[in-house]
Each structure stands twice: as structure tokens, then as C-alpha cells.
Image (tube, grey):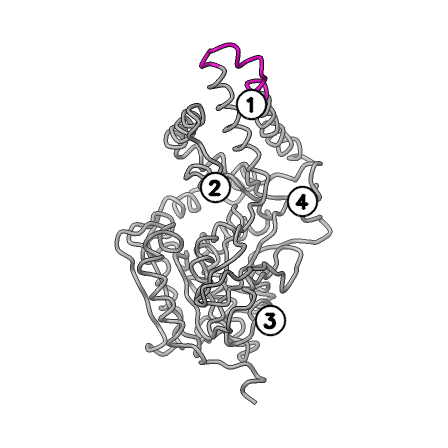
Amino acid sequence: MRYMATYDLMETVRNTNQWLGATAKAFAAYPGISMVPNPVFQWMGAWGEVTERSFARMVAKPDWGIHSYTCEDGRDHIVNVEKVVERDFGDLIHFNVQGRPDTTRKVLLVAPMSGHYATLLRSTVISLLPDCEVYVTDWHNARDIPVSAGKFDVEDYTLYLVEFMRHLGPDTHVIAVCQPAPLTLAATAYLAEEDPSAQPSSLTLIGGPIDPDAAPTEVTDFGNRVTMGQLEEMMIQRVGFKYPGVGRQVYPGLLQLSSFMTMNAETHGKAFMDQIHRATRGEARDNDRHNRFYDEYLAVMDMPAEFYLSTVERVFKNLEIAQNKFVVNGKKVDIGKITDVAVKTVEGAKDDISAPGQCVAALRLCTGLPEELKASHLEPGAGHYGIFAGKSWRSNIRPLVLEFIDANNGRHKPAAAAE
């Protein structure tokens, strides 16, 4: 019970600010106020509008917002988001484009579990839909998962990926973005030993910390500076009484968000003041640039404490993936056992989260893989976000990834097709 009070205090502060924003907005909207030509009331209403929206987004899961897609036939086709595999901590979802001709590219997009929802990859999904059958790992907010569901650490995460890959079959092309890259590599190696016929045809790792020590950043420096005891004391709390996961130990999304905002307080402060001024002038729109960005950025989710702590300890501190010492269910996972899965790494030259060198280390670990099945790409001038969702992704990286997929399409065929 020690940290429930802290968790509930954060939620109380958030809830209070949302209420204050709604109150200011409502007060400024009274007809009688319009009789007083004072710009203070306009500013109050604008402040309330921006404040209410911002604090409300912190506890709301964003919608994918992908409802239809215009195919080559010139018609709009309905896009249904369907759950293919449902599990306690995450689902495998499919973006089913109704009435579209079958495509030979089947892609599993592995989304990060790093404090934001899988919808962070919305633009990535949209860019792949024209050419691929897209599946995504949709991780759940830990505050909504009852304690009775048990723990969820890096080994459980890896086994979830193994299950998803098995379900989709060997004609799948896996793309892992950022945080899940090391565990996706481990899941592929796990299948190479335990169930070779279920291995994907290709694996693309984008900006992931395979070897965090290969190119240190502020993220890796922080992980090395603090002890696990300090990390647990500072970051871990128990979910309060408001949510189904009451009592579960988590790394709260609100705590992580406050850290992010503090790191760039001046930039965020200016962005919100500018938005208030736009709202005062009547220029703010529901889907303007500010709201599109912050609706996603502020929508945070809690991570299971076991997952957060084991990620820091085993991936960043002990370098179990980088040194090929990772263990799942008591069994050592040998990355060198990957011999028939094409592997490509993508890095951004200006990535300050997973710096160049961290991700390409995966190719060094794939000692059993022929050189012709290895590929790498370093995108000049690209930061972390740009390599999977920005201009660099759309203009340069996406075509290269699709080319890599096509080059390895049909490498592994499902059992039924092979017969």
C-alpha cells in the first residue's frame, strides 16, 4: 500500500487541473460574460480549453483514426481494426482493408511498450497499408490489468512475440520499432531453436538498443548511473483505487510524462502558450498541428514494474542481449541460431535515444546468418522519430524496407502451402 497514496495524489492533481480547465472554459462561455468586452475572459476561456483537453488526454487511449483507405481501384475501402489474438497484457490486432485484393506482404509491426500506446505508430501503419497486410502488437495499460493476471517482464514480453509470430506463420515480415528490437531479435532466435518452421521471413530492426554500450546516450548513461534499488524507489508505485489494476506495481505514465516535460520545459511551455493565444484569436482547431502532436504525446500508459525494471537491468545494465546471454524460461537464447531469417537494421545519424551503432550490433550477433541475408541502413540527418514516422521514413526508409521485404518474400512458406 506504500505507494498507492503517491499514485492517487498524481491522479488527483491531474483530475483537478482538468476540472479547473473545464470550469474556466464554462465560466467564460456564459452569455452574460460577453456583455463585458474584456480580453481577460477570452484568455480565460482559451486557457480552460487548452488545459482541459491536455489533462483529459493523459488518461485516454487514443483512437487509431484509420477508418478507410483509397485503394488502386479508386474506391474507398473500410478499414476494420480486429483483434486476432487477445491476451492479458497485449493483443495482436489486424488492420483489415475490406474488399482489397490480396497482398503478398504480411507485416507484423512490433510497437514499443515504453509509456505510450501503440497508436504512436499510427503514421507508420498508414504508410504501410497501401502495400501490406498490417498486424500490430497493441499493448495494454498496466493500470487496467488486475493483479490476478500475474507478472509481465522481458521474458513474458518475448514469449508474447513468439506466440504472435507463430500465429501469423513463417510468411511474415517483422518490423520492430525502437524499444522492442532486442526482445524481437531474442524471440526470433527462440523460434530458431524451438520451432524453426515458425520463423518469420525477414526481420527489420529500427532504432533499437541491441547494444546500448556501442554508442552511449543520455538514456544509457542514466541507466548506468542509478542502482536498481534507487530506480525502484524513485519510479515504482502501486495503482490506486480508481482503476481495475488496483495494487499492481507499475512505472506510472504520468511520472514518465512529467520527466519528459521537465527535460524540455521551455519548449513545451512555449508550445502551450502559443496554443492558448491561437485559441484566444479563434484560430485553434480540433485537428491542428499542436493538438495532433500533444493528443498523442500526452496520452501515456503505465508499464508493469517487472517489465520496466527487468528492461533496465537485463538489456541496459547487464547487456544480456548484446552479450548473447539472454535467458527465457530457464533456457539460454542463442542469437547465433538464426540462420535463415533475413535481418536488416535501420538507424538515424542524429538519433539521440538509440544512437548509431546500437542497432546495427544485431548483425554482429547473428553469427550463423549468411552475409547475403544481412543488411543495414544509416539515414543521414534523421533523428529517432524520423526513422519510423517522419519525412525520412516516408521518403527513404519505407521504400528500402519494402524492397527488403520483397527480396525475401516467399523465403518461408506456411506448411499448408508447402504441401
Of badges 4 and 1, the one in the foreground is 1
| Residue 265 lies in quadrant | top left
Labels 3 and 1: the sequence-earlier one: 1
Q: Which of 31 and 387 is in front in this view?
A: 31
Q: Main secondary structure of the magenta part?
A: helix
In this figure, which residue is indicated by the disc labeled 3? 167
Q: Which residue is drawn at 59% across and 50% down?
A: 306
Q: Is mark 4 on a helix, strand or loop?
A: loop
Image coordinates of residue 12 in percent, x first then y, are 63, 28
Image coordinates of residue 127 in percent, x first then y, are 42, 59
Tag 4: residue type?
Answer: Arg
In this figure, which residue is indicated by the disc labeled 2? 297
Residue 29, placed above or below residue 56: above
Q: Is mark 2 on a helix, strand or loop?
A: helix
In this figure, which residue is indicated by the disc labeled 1? 25
Q: Is there a contact, CB below 8 Å, between mark 3 and mark 1?
A: no
Tag 2: residue type?
Answer: Tyr
Residue 291 drawn in magenta: no
